[in-house]
Amino acid sequence: MTRYCTTCGSPTTQQTEKQNLWVCENKHDNWINPVAGSIVFVIKDGQALFGVRSIDPNPGKLCLPGGFIELGESAEQTAVREVKAELGIDVTVIDFLGSYPSTYTNGRATINFVFIADYTAGEVTPGDDLNGGDPMWRDIENLPAQDDLAWEWYADAQKDLSEWWQRKPGK
């Protein structure tokens, strides 16, 4: 695939020392970095909330609420906004679980910042791209199987959530 310089429009070539650096004949650097997203495990009474994807990619698969971070928005603000848009509820972010690299559609590199949030108010109402079925609460000690999940990297996040839950005092 030919990439063009964002400064002058000339074709670029990938640099061997940096996979994500492309340089044009005028020596302009063009960095191809991952797109950042916020994903949320919503927790209530020892359970995590999953929606069902309604659109490509992976329609019908279980999915955590989340989305891409907008300009001027923190990862935590995105997390709260996306839960409201996709599941209709209010949450309070309580912890950062970790970051997980992945690839979205068309090979787009992403970095997913995963948060844990307490359910605080509202009725769970699927919307946006999570209205492909009835959302479901799953015990943190019995999370969905890989085949049921929208993204492969969720398996690592679920493992980390289980470990976080085991360390949680007074659970």
Image: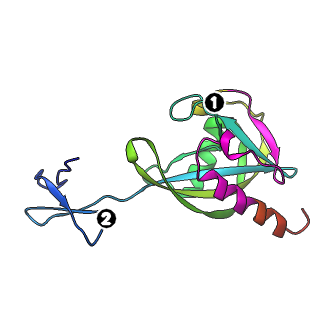
Magenta segment, which residues?
Answer: 133-161
- The amino acid sitting under disc 2 is Gln
The one of 99 and 116 positioned closer to us in this rendering: 99
**37 or 160: nearer the eye?**
160
Residue extending furthest toward the front:
147
- In-image side of 26 versus 165 (left or right): left
* Point 65% across, 58% down: residue: 156
On residue 60, the disc is: 1
Mark 2 and 1 residues: CB-CB less than 8 Å, in contact? no
Is residue 12 at least partly visible in the picture?
yes
Which image quadrant is residue 127 in? top right
What's the residue at 51%, 31% (across, down)?
56
**How far across and how far down the image is residue 9, in percent?**
12, 50
- Where is residue 70? Give x, y as percent: 46, 49
Q: Which numbered disc covers residue 130?
A: none
73 vs 66: above or below: below
Horizontal relation, residue 90 to residue 77: left or right: right
Residue, disc 2 = 19
Task: Between residue 33 and residue 7, name the one nearer to us.
Answer: 33
